[in-house]
């Protein structure tokens, strides 16, 4: 039954009202919290949440599916100063499928609610799914001393998918290198470098991320993250993010985070919370 609920949420063609989307997310959360951990032989769950710019170099075990959902609110002041853009992600969604030891497939989308206002008066609003993104993560090598664990990640945003207001005219590909170093029992360092060819804006985008990941107890952890995008048109976005994670069992993670923009081009702030749940299919 849990698998059926997940498929309903992640289908980009679903046209259900917002209250039903939120209800289904709650049902998955409740099912995950009450489920028994049947994968004791697996390592503890490792998620690409809640960092906004950092993906983990670790892959899913073969035969596993991992659902990563989150709610996010973002606020950004525009020019002139009295203009404000508010964006709600309800939810951000990622489905990860462990195909084999060195390969996982990924499917992602966001449901966006954008509200633009001027002097507290609503002037524009739009709601819909972002373009569907498909990709894969490839394992390269484990950590050896100071040499980090490495993985390669690919992603393609597909034209003709999502709400008409957000649809792309061309494919937007991304290629990234993910690195991770476990420093000691309580600290790990994760870095990402990504290259995107944005055919809609006709420019290159270089993404970077540095995350310090902390382990407080067997169940509690946290992170601080610096990340951003460098555009070929001399426009940069730099942000800072921090938060906590709670891992009640090997296959479930809950998280909460808060972030701020570090320059004028970046959003002012955002707040997010979410869940990652892993289960076995073969």
Image: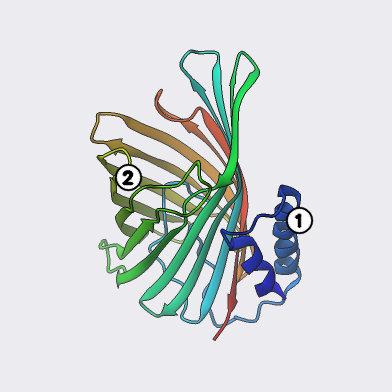
Disc 1 to disc 2, C-alpha distance: 35 Å
Q: Which residue is disc 2 drawn over?
A: 208
Q: Nearer the viewer, residue 154 or 177?
A: 154
- Quadrant, the N terminus: bottom right
Question: Please, what secondary structure does the residue beneath circle 1 have?
Answer: helix
Q: Is residue 102 left or right of residue 46?
A: left
For marks 1 and 2 on the same chain, the one whose residue lies earlier in the sequence: 1
Q: Residues within 10 Å of mark 1 (few under 14, many from 20)?
A: few
* Residue lying at 62% horizontally and 68% vertically, measured from the top left: 7
Residue 187 in view (yes/no): yes
Q: How is the image coloured?
A: rainbow
Q: Position of residue 56 (x, y in %)?
A: 42, 60
* Residue lying at 33% horizontally and 53% vertically, measured from the top left: 171
Q: Position of residue 156 (x, y in %)?
A: 36, 58
Question: Please, what secondary structure does the residue beneath circle 2 have?
Answer: strand
- Quadrant, the C terminus: bottom right
Q: In the rendered view, tell whether residue 29 sits above or below residue 34.
A: above
Q: Which residue is disc 1 drawn over?
A: 23
């Amino acid at each position: 039954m849990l698998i059926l609920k997940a498929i309903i949420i992640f289908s980009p063609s679903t046209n259900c009202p917002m209250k039903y989307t939120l209800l289904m997310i709650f049902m998955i959360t409740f099912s995950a919290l009450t489920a028994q951990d049947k994968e004791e032989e697996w390592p503890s769950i490792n998620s690409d949440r809640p960092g906004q710019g950092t993906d983990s170099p670790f892959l899913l075990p073969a035969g596993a599916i991992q659902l990563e959902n989150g709610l996010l609110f973002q606020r950004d002041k525009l020019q002139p100063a009295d203009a404000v853009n508010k964006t709600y992600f309800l939810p951000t969604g990622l489905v990860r499928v462990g195909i084999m030891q060195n390969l996982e497939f990924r499917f992602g989308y966001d449901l966006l609610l954008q509200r633009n206002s001027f002097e507290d008066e609503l002037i524009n609003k739009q709601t819909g799914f972002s373009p569907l993104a498909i990709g894969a993560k490839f394992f390269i090598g484990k950590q050896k001393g100071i040499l980090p664990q490495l993985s390669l990640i690919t992603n393609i945003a597909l034209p003709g998918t999502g709400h008409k207001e957000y649809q792309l005219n061309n494919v937007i590909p991304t290629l990234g290198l993910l690195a991770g170093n476990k420093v000691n029992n309580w600290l790990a360092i994760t870095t990402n470098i990504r290259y995107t060819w944005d055919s809609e804006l006709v420019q290159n985008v270089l993404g970077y991320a540095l995350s310090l990941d902390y382990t407080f107890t067997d169940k509690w952890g946290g992170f601080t993250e610096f990340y951003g995008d460098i555009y070929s048109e001399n426009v940069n976005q730099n942000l800072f993010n921090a938060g906590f994670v709670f891992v009640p069992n090997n296959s479930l993670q809950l998280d909460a985070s808060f972030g701020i923009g570090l320059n004028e081009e970046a959003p002012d702030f955002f707040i997010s919370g979410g869940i990652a749940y892993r289960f076995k299919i073969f």
